[in-house]
Image (cartoon, grey):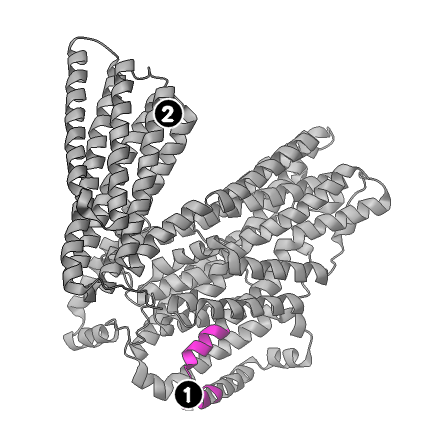
Amino acid sequence: MSEFYTVAVAVLAVLAVSGLYVGVTNDAVNFLNSAIGSKAAGMRTILAVASVGIILGVISSSGMMEVARNGMFNPSFFTFGEVMAIYLGVMLANVILLDIYNSMGLPTSTTVSLIFCLLGAAVAVSAYKISSEPTLSAGDLGDFINTSRAMGIISAILLSVAIAFTCGTVTMWISRMIFSFRYMALFRRFGAMWCGVSLTAIVYFALFKGLKSTFAESAAAVWIDHNLPVALALCWVACSVLLAFLQLFRINILRITILSGTFALALAFAGNDLVNFIGVPVAGFDAYSIAREAGNTDVVMSALNENIPANMIFMLTAGAIMVLTLWTSRKAMHVTETEISLSAQSSDDEPQYGSNVFSRGIVRLSINAATAIERVTPLKVREFVARRFEYVDVEHSGAPYDMIRATVNLTTSALLISLATSLKLPLSTTYVCFMVAMGSSLADKAWGRESAVYRITGVMTVVMGWFTTAIGGFAIAFATGLLLIWGGIPAFAAMTLLCGYMLVKSNFKKKSREEAAASAVDGATAGTVDDIAEEVCRMMQTATRIYDRTIVAVFKENRKALRDLVRESEDIYRDSRKLRSGLMPTLRRLKGAGLELSLYYIQMVDYLSEIAEALVHITRPTFEHIDNNHEGLSREQATDLMHINDDVAEIYGSINRILVTNDFSEIDSVLSMREDLFERIAATTKSELVRINEGEGNTKASILYLTILSETRTMVLQARNLLKAQRYFSEHADARMGRVRYTRNS
């Protein structure tokens, strides 16, 4: 046995761990969002419940490896080396594909990505075999590939999107008509029966989706299968009685129902989808064992047609990785935020997605349809319906949506997936959960006119992403598989290094920037004056560093450095936009602190945004100038900019010291330096205009030079304004409020 294949199996093991990480990161949206979005419990409690569900799902699963072993291709037509090329191509492509989706915060299906990566890699290796053997033709491809499974996945996408969205909308509308947003009084009388329905659906889902392999052959399962209506009715009665009893002790049964649903979804994912996901590395290990016993790497892999239960050690290890990822992955929270932001009741935040002609057209059509319906609907009916959907945060949690909607999301998802499982319909868990949540948010009138266009665009972006999962997975795996079977060991080494680099870059190199961005938003919303000043200093120090490095890089015509600086300046600008997106929620948190603090915060956000935008307008044209191989700046231009750069660093340094110490005794000195700098900028601008009139220098270099001067002036001007706003606040707010500090609501 070649040492290469030993290394390949080891790489598959490493990729399995990475694959589990990105897979769980993406699928966490399925079983976390309802609990997180409704604030049914603290984050640690939610994660603990999901973790228990995962471990139990892993232990109880006896899933088969047939998907990876023989579900998408016929192993009897492939040798060990060819099968390993397929499996390596699948894992490399799958990890890269899912990491791209996670980085964009888009939930997708790990099952779909795996299936189409398998299909793509298998087609690539099959095409290579057919082209290498004169006796074979393109028509023989059907002997190598199982295309019916891929068609089943495509149908699953279509069914999941349409059915889940419709059911989520209808169920939520009916539920809200019953309970409204002021549901407390009515819920005390009928809540146990309503939650009993939800808990029954969740129990059925947990038993026959999450634990189906454990109970499938039991006498109880057989009886339930033949007497399903009676079994469900008995379960509903038992659940309703239990919940009514708990209500007597003032226990929040909505919270119990939501956490039970979270547990059931985690259970189902670990018991089913996880088996599929680790199937490829396990099948690769099985193929390695078969070849080692045969003592021949050219042995045909017919033995992979035998279905073998997953090794429990592998399963437990995978479960442990899942739990660890769930607790530590920042990207899991990023993916979760996408659904929550699209379904939140409030529309205060800046839209995450833009608009397009399609979404705008849908909103206009909906408005016209609603207007037409109103004309024929009696006034009293319209008023009654309006009262049922009049939003009130009766839970006083400040959650994106209430626990009634969270319960509807979990119940509807559980019922749909359970029904599809019993009917052997290939519905995707990811797609069902997401589209139910979108349908319920639409019915709950979360999609108001202020946010409807953006939310529709967001939903369409996610849905189109699902379809591109199949296309992208197939394309990436096809290219990877073809490269591996053709290029051998060098191609294997190159692809492994590329995959490793992408994962490291995505999960570690960006960590500090993400933490800084989170600090920007958190510092603002947490709210002490000192925190705000600290954040201002951080961003201004970063801006000073970027500005200084940009000036030096343009002198040296360092294209790589300028490209990185463009990226950093755009990151700062995005950070400032994040502060702006949280403006309204922050102002509400600060409303009791007086108008001065609110005014200061608004001004701070505006001035920081202007500084960041000016910086982008310096770095981007500078990079484009050098990237297009234009002539660099002249000696006179470089000298002038170096002096200006020194002045900017001195001014920003002084401003930072003032903000940190809250000592404004040096403010007159700063204002004087600012005036001197403006005079220098005016003088250098005039000098450049003289050179232009005399026909000296290069036109494009002059345009770049004048652009830098203009945007530098803007940066310094807005920094001055920021300083004056801080002084005003310190002189007035401190006197009136006694330097009050504000803490985040837990």
Q: Can residue 487 be seen in the rendering of this structure? A: yes
Residue segment shown in magenta: 242-260
- In terms of image quadrants, where is residue 349? bottom left
Which amino acid lies under the numbered mark 2 shown in the image of this protein?
Ala
User: Closer to us: mark 2 or mark 1?
Assistant: 2
**Amino acid on which disc 1 is placed:** Gln
Q: Nearer the viewer, residue 671 or 234?
A: 671
Res 60 quadrant in image? bottom right
Magenta-colored stretch includes residue 712: no
Residue depicted at 18% across the width and 41% down the height = 720
Q: Is residue 167 above or below residue 148?
A: below
Q: How many marks?
A: 2
Q: Name the image quarter holding the C terminus.
A: bottom left
Q: Quadrant of residue 572?
A: top left
The secondary structure that dominates the magenta segment is helix
Q: Residue at x 72, y 45 (%)?
A: 9
Provide the residue designation for mark 2.
553
